[in-house]
Amino acid sequence: MLELAILGFLYDTPLHGYKLRKRITALTGHVRPVAESTLYPAIKRLEKAGLLERATEPGAVAAPRHVLTLTGDGRSELRRRLAEPVQRDITDENRWFTVLAFLRHLADPAAQTAVLRRRLAFLETPASFFYEGDRPLRAEELDDPFRRGILTVARATTQAELAWLRATIDSLEGVAR
Amino acid sequence: MLELAILGFLYDTPLHGYKLRKRITALTGHVRPVAESTLYPAIKRLEKAGLLERATEPGAVAAPRHVLTLTGDGRSELRRRLAEPVQRDITDENRWFTVLAFLRHLADPAAQTAVLRRRLAFLETPASFFYEGDRPLRAEELDDPFRRGILTVARATTQAELAWLRATIDSLEGVAR
DNA sequence: TGAGGATACATCGGTAACGAGGTATTGCTC
DNA sequence: GAGCAATACCTCGTTACCGATGTATCCTCA
């Protein structure tokens, strides 16, 4: 997820590590903060894999900066990860939002809708958090107010996202036609 | 998060590993599957820490089962983790839902509302995923349909959860008074 | 009778992430 | 002029988790 965010932000413009960190913190930081000790090793991994390059330039304020630029491989790797997300990227909202944040980099509307449809299929699969045998329980069937809360909130999220997904898929297909 | 779920499910009733896994999969599995190779070591950790005990009994169908029972320490450790969740448990929806799923084990309504209030404070803090300088951007200000989607869905979730939180806190305080 | 699926538990190697700490500079406030 | 926040990068030890793989039993269905 972190690597995807790095690739995604650098796809637009080269950035140095510190600024990249600010962007990532804005995107996912309020929910899941990114430790510096996670970011810098991740940058090194991507550099080692040939997906980005560093250039040292004098720091504007303090220490010298390492300006990070995606290579051609890096650019195609981002598109590959966006076009073929692993299933966890589809089901886990934190990861899914990261995919969405950069999905515009997948230039082809058909490829974009294909990804949206995977999320749609996931959300349309009936699932609960609590079961009686195999039957998913509805909020109304639970006594526990906190568990009811989980189902209430999850349902609202799912409804909102389904509506958005369907509208967006429709409009993307309108463009394609 | 996994440890919390193990403690939470065992708080109600002893279970063997396989059944525990089924429960956890129902709770969070559709979003974030739990690998067996994560669950069994986690059980061992908790056993080593003296939070649960194992008793081998013949398997109903196949191999012998290890029935897991919380110790007194395990029971108080669960209550402690529920009463004083780390900040990530409050901000990350996956973790938060796990806290909620077991919050009823915190017998004291005042302790329960204290936890709900932490989530309330987090949700009431204005935050976006995208900024112009320091100013959070609203869905309407974005051109990118996918980023608009993130904000649209997040807003719907937040509204639903705020409503639920406020109603639940009110009703818990009604009980206390 | 034999293949597959469910039950039931476990190990192993690898990796992503965390927290704590370190280094160094600039610029602002007290 | 001392202290602190912000900028800018890094290492180290530990943990949590993953995928692949292994072992064994029982039941069902072809």
Image: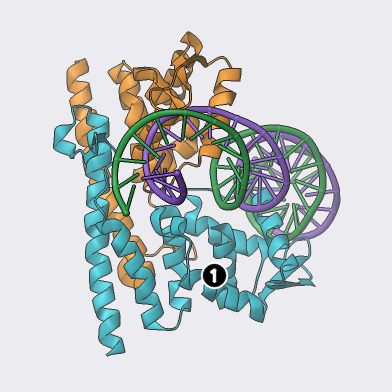
Chain colours: A orange, B cyan, C green, D purple
| Percent of width and height locating residue B98 | 46, 62
Q: Nearer the viewer, residue B30 or B173?
A: B173
Instruction: Tell me the residue that label 1 is attached to.
Output: B8
| Percent of width and height locating residue A75 | 44, 14
Secondary structure, mark 1, is: helix
| Percent of width and height locating residue A174 | 17, 21
Quarter assignment of residue A62 = top left
Q: Residues within 10 Å of mark 1 (few under 14, many from 20)?
A: many
Q: Is residue A146 left or right of residue A54?
A: left
Badge 1 amino acid:
Gly
Compared to A120, does A32 lie above or below?
A: below
Residue farthest left in this picture: B140
Quarter assignment of residue A167 = top left
Compared to B84, does A29 lie above or below?
A: above
- Quarter of the figure with the C terminus of chain B: bottom left
Question: Is residue A138 in sight in this rendering?
Answer: no
Compared to A44, does B48 lie above or below?
A: below
Question: Is residue A109 in sight in this rendering?
Answer: yes
**Protein chain holding label 1:** B
Residue farthest top in this picture: A72
Q: Is residue A59 left or right of residue B168?
A: right
Q: Nearer the viewer, residue B155 or A14?
A: A14
Compared to A147, does A97 lie above or below?
A: above
| Percent of width and height locating residue B72 | 65, 81
Q: Residue at x 28, y 75 (%)?
A: B169
Q: Residue at x 43, y 76 (%)?
A: B104
Q: Nearer the viewer, residue A19 or A148?
A: A19
Q: Residue at x 55, y 63 (%)?
A: B5
